[in-house]
Amino acid sequence: MTQRAAQRLPRIALLLFCAAYLLPGLFGRDPWRNADLTAFGYMQAMAEGRTSWWAPSLGQLSPETALLPHWIGAWSVQLLGHWLDPALAARLPFTFLLALTLSLVWYAMFHLARTDAAQPVPFAFGGEAEPVDYARAMADGALLATIATLGLLQLGHETTPELLQLSLVSLFIWAMAAAPYSRRRVALAVLVALPALALSGAPSIATALGLTALPLSQRSSHAGMRALWPWLVASLLVAALAATLTHAWQWRVALREQPAEWLGLLRLLLWFTWPAWPMAVWTLWRWRSHWPYRHIAIPASTVLIALLSSVLMGGSDRALMLALPGLAILAAFALPTLQRSTGAAIDWFSVFFFSVAGLAIWVIYFSTQTGTPPQPLRNILRLVPGYESEFSLLALAFAVAGTLAWLWLVRWRTSRHRHPLWKSLVLPASGVALAWLLLMTLLLPVLDYGRSTRPLVQQIARLVPAHACLLAPGLSRTHVAGLEVFGNYQVDARSEEDKVAAAKALLPTTPPADIPMPATCDYQLLLTRTAQAEAPAGWQLLAKFHRPVDRGEYFALYRRGS
């Protein structure tokens, strides 16, 4: 490895890469359906005092167990919600967590690449890369590999507990990597990482990480690593205690049984971790004699734990996301061993794929704004009926700047042979950043319209006043969160059986078998699979409607009869 190959990525370019990846999607959108909206619903309810901080619930449904991420979002809403949109206020700390993840991956790789076993072989007559320069170039490659990973693109920009879990796994990897160099900070990081991970909804993964790190610490040749094992034991005990006190232990095993389901899991692994996984596999092969060494064992163990967790949870992409920091580090260790033809193949595939993707986004944008060509607009209106196009000069300016930057990078990379170690990951990382930037600028209005529940709640708001009590038995937490966030309704989504059980629990003695439930809500919203719905006894049908993009789900709104 020559000194010329150990050139580091210019810091301004690195910061621009990170900004182009972190900032798009932060502003100007609603919390999107499913996990993003559900998590924000908990945070806003806690910030406004509508639910308990120790047992948060939505629509009086059973509480969630990932307390710490919801606390962070609720604190941010309380602190910044008076000046910013509450959704933006809740999103800001999670954007910081994604930035922290990128930083921790960089520093973890920097420390691991400085390990003697990870250093390149010196030349007979000198001229080899300096150890620190080599470590910096490898760290740049690990950061680019993280950005280039497809699975992190959407999940990394949501306001969900898994993003805090990702940053804590990265913190733990950094602690293990930096143990020989900074004992006090590493001990503090270990004491924080595992208990915080347990409070973030992943106590089993926290336990597995700690138990796996114990033998690596005890058998290490570095004194700093060997001195870490008492702190690991203490952190494991605190994590187990925290998970027990907050009732975070849950059995989530759901193995797939059918061959088609296993095939779907394989497809998830292939695209979710692309392009890190083929490079990580190549690293494990080329560095196969170094498996016991810390620069391979530390990231590989975290990848294995996250992969097994994903498989045991039936192919959970959110559990698989925790493997990405370790995969990025392993992928970066493949860079010194890649042949020129392999690097060229990665470059040309990236140029073709992301150029076509960017062109497609621009064509769709022009169609929504001008009607030319007409087919993309017809497709959009078929998928999201009722959408009306919007124009933003600022969004267009950012999209143009990002596209020009992509063209310049393609020209820079393909014009002549480049020597930096990280060169093969520049185009994949910048292509992912370009695609995300274009989606979050040019197509953000249509994506926000299709993925937000605001259009549904606006239909309900025409008939139900704000702050009204709304019965919604059988609705998911996502629907309940949408009703509370966008409609300011007091939602009760419990079934009659749950209400009876709650009433029995409040009575000091055994009540009669039939407990009359107080009728406090004047409106009821039911989910049906057909457009035809019969009104329950004592209720009058007001309207039937559905979200524009969910034609298979119909909502029937009722008012209590006189």
Image (cartoon, grey):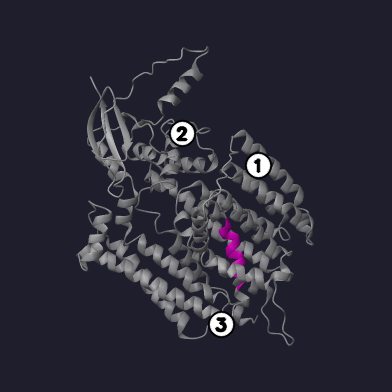
Residue 340, numbered label:
3
Q: Which residue is mark 2?
A: 57
Give the residue displayed 28% in from the left and 55% down from the top: 383
Callout 2–callout 3 Cβ contact below 8 Å: no
Task: Give the amino acid at mark 1.
Answer: Ala
- Sequence-wise, the earlier of marks 3 and 1 is 1
Residue 120: in magenta span: no
- Sequence-wise, the earlier of marks 2 and 3 is 2
Task: Give the amino acid at mark 3.
Answer: Arg
Q: Is residue 473 left or right of residue 455?
A: right
The answer to whether 391 is drawn above or below residue 127 in the figure is: above
Callout 3–callout 1 Cβ contact below 8 Å: no
* Callout 1 secondary element: helix
Please, which residue is most extreme toward the front here? 259
User: Is residue 192 something one can see in this rendering?
Assistant: no
| Image quadrant assignment for residue 544 | top left
The magenta segment is 323-334
Task: Give the amino acid at mark 2.
Answer: Ser
Q: Position of residue 219 (x, y in %)?
A: 79, 58
Q: Which residue is mark 1?
A: 239
